[in-house]
Structures are given as structure tokens and as C-alpha cells.
Image: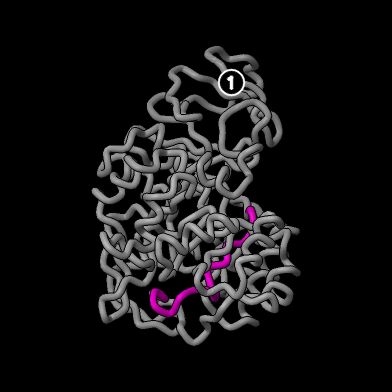
Amino acid sequence: MITDNRIMKDCFVEIRGDEITWIGNEKKNLDHALYEVKDGFICPGLTDVHIHGVNGFDFMDNQEAFTDIANSLPSYGVTSFLATSRTAAEKDVEQFLRRVKIHQNSPSGGANCLGAHLEGPWISPAYSGVQSKSYIRELTWNDVDTIINPYLKNISVITLAPEEVEKHAILNYLQSNGIHISAGHTNASLEEIGGAIDSGLTQITHTFNAMSPVHHRTPGTAAASLYYDDITCEIIADGIHVNPSMIELLYKVKGQEKMILISDCTGYNDLADGEYFFRGKNLVKAGNKVTLKSGQLAGSAITLDKGLKYIVEQCHIPLEQAVYMATQGPLNAIGQGETRGRIAAGYKADIMILNSDLMVERTIVNGKKVYSRDAC
């Protein structure tokens, strides 16, 4: 069993209803034994706090996409997620937030939706990536009133460019209302990130991607991610977005406590290699790489289980710490680690079982087995 940065051998886990009720080295109650793992690992279920879609679906497509994505994610070991938006027209962002609220109020099974992650439109045009520049705007108090305030209970994270905020008091306001602020798609300097930290910034979105770089004379956001101890850094571990040595460097600097794995999956994970036209863009898929025809990266095509396997096998990160970065770490970063993300009595029975090759064998969500690889 892997939890709390430890690997514990010969462990048994008892589940009653939707909770873990007991763990130990002996079977406590045979009536509640689900199965035994002979050659593998019992882990907390993965939590993906930055995911746009999977298996061809995108959260901004329609309401049905929420159901399709939630039901698909357990096959990748994911038991909880934040539905993530992209830069779009105000009406589309508001519609996305309404769908998040509807899904949270009436979940349809599968992985747990823990809220929304708004990625834009309050970002920098200098580092927009493939986000639509026509919808990029400054974050104003008017946006807070009209877009954010109606969904304060549903928004968990907002990715923004700190230099594109009308007043830093807005950041203080968002933080005081339980919204976690992440710097991404930003041209901020190291000093500007420091000022934003003083106003409530706590995270960096897909570290090293779409941000001002590490530079020895004019250090930007990427440098700030390494410099400021209290900042939690997202990382896409696919060997495409970030060189494995840079992932290892980030780990050496931040440790497992301040580094969280994300997929940033844009729903193209199951596409065969080739050229496609999706959502107004001409895309090229080659393995795990998705680009525009120009060669510019157009999001991620991995799922979180693949990222976990990658950092263990390619970045020299111990398995127990990699699991922490994809389970407890993300939940702690969004303030939801008190009831999920650990295998311990009183915690939700959200569990992923990996085989010795780190492939997902089974997934349990809220005490119910929702995926089994041998049943596929």
C-alpha cells in the first residue's frame, strides 16, 4: 500500500459504504474484503486538478461531456478532478461555470468533480499559447461581480497573469473566498510574482510552459517558481512539454510537497496519429504530441497515470513520492485534502490499484468498484 509518502507491505484495507474504516496487517473483517492484490500497489485515487477533457470530450462542449469525462477518468486511475476551461467569450465561460454547478449538484457517477479551474481569459497575450487572443482581457472588479461571484462555491482555481489584474486587492478578495490563484500564461517578472504572492497567489500553472523564462538578468515566472519556497508548481510529465531533467530539477528544488502532477489533457489522448480539425483548430497528433500545423504545442495528450509512470521511470523520482504528487499533493493545494487523497480510516474510499508495471488495474470511487482492466 502506498500513502503518506510511504510504501507499506502486506496491508489490508477495509471499506464500509463510501469510507475507509480500517487498515492493518491482518484481515479485520472477512465479510468486507473486496479482493487481494498479489503483485502491485493499493494507492489513493489520482486527482487531476488541470484537465480539459479526455477520450475526445471537452468540458466546454456541452453538459453531456461532464458525464462522459467523469465516467472515463477511472480507467486512468483518476477518482477526482477539477473541470478546466479555456480562454473564451464571457458567455461561454459563464455557461461552463453553470455546467460545473449542475454537475456538482447532480453527479452522474464516475470520478468526483471537485469544482472548476478557470484557465483564462485573464492572461497575457505575450504567452497565450493556443488560447484565443481575441478573448484575452484584464481581470477587473466588474468581471469579479458578473462572472466569478455567482459561482464562488464552484470555482476552486483561477489561472491568471498577475500583471493583467486591475487591482491586487482582487487577488486578496479571491483568496479570502476560498479560490486558489495560480500564475499561468503570464509575462510577469520574478518581482511581480513576489508581489502577487503577498496578495494571495499560491500556485504556478504548468510550470515552465507559457510563461516568462528563467533568465540570469531578467528572471521571469519560471525562475520565480524555483525561487519562492511556498509556491506549489504544476508539471506536465509527458517528456514533450518539459525535458525530464528539468522535471527532476523542479523536484530537487520543490520536493514532493510543492510539486503536483497534472495531465492538462485536451481530450486528444485516444486519437490515432494524423491530422484533425477540432474546435476551430487544425491539429497534428503524433504519439503523445499534439500541435498546430505550425508545430506549436496545442495541449497535452496524456492522462495522469501516464505522467505518474513517466516521472518514476524517467525522472528518478521514488514511486511513493510520485504517488503523493498525484494524490495528496493536488488535494492539499486546493484545500480538499482533509477527507480525500489518503488511505486512512475516515477518508473517502477513492482507491487506485496499480500492477507492478504501474498500469491501472482497478479503480474504486466512493467505495464502489467502477473500473477493472480485466473486464475491458
Crowdedness near tag 1: few (<14), some (14–19) or many (≥20) residues, C-alpha within 10 Å: some
Q: Say left or right for 247 vs 188.
A: left
Magenta-colored span: 114-128
Kindly identify the residue that appears in the image at 62 percent across and 51 percent down: 112
Q: Say left or right for 208 vs 184.
A: left
Kindly identify the residue that appears in the image at 52 percent across and 74 percent down: 164
Which image quarter: residue 248? top left
| Viewer-closest of 242 and 110 | 242
Is 315 drawn above or below residue 12 in the view shown?
A: below
The image's colour scheme reads: one colour
Where residue 308 appears, as percent x and y from the top left, is 38, 44
Residue 335 in view here = yes
Where residue 269 appears, as percent x and y from the top left, is 39, 62
Where residue 244 appears, as percent x and y from the top left, is 26, 50
Magenta segment includes 126: yes
Residue 270 in view here = no
- Dot 1 corresponds to which residue? 23
Where residue 294 appears, as percent x and y from the top left, is 26, 81
Is 260 drawn above or below residue 171 in the view shown?
A: above
| Viewer-closest of 159 and 17 | 159
Magenta segment includes 333: no
Secondary structure found at label 1: strand
Kindly identify the residue that appears in the image at 49 percent across and 73 percent down: 123
| Residue furthest top in the image | 26
Which image quarter: residue 267? bottom left
Residue type at the position of mark 1:
Ile
Kindly identify the residue that appears in the image at 26 percent across and 76 percent down: 295
Is 341 drawn above or below residue 115 in the view shown?
A: above
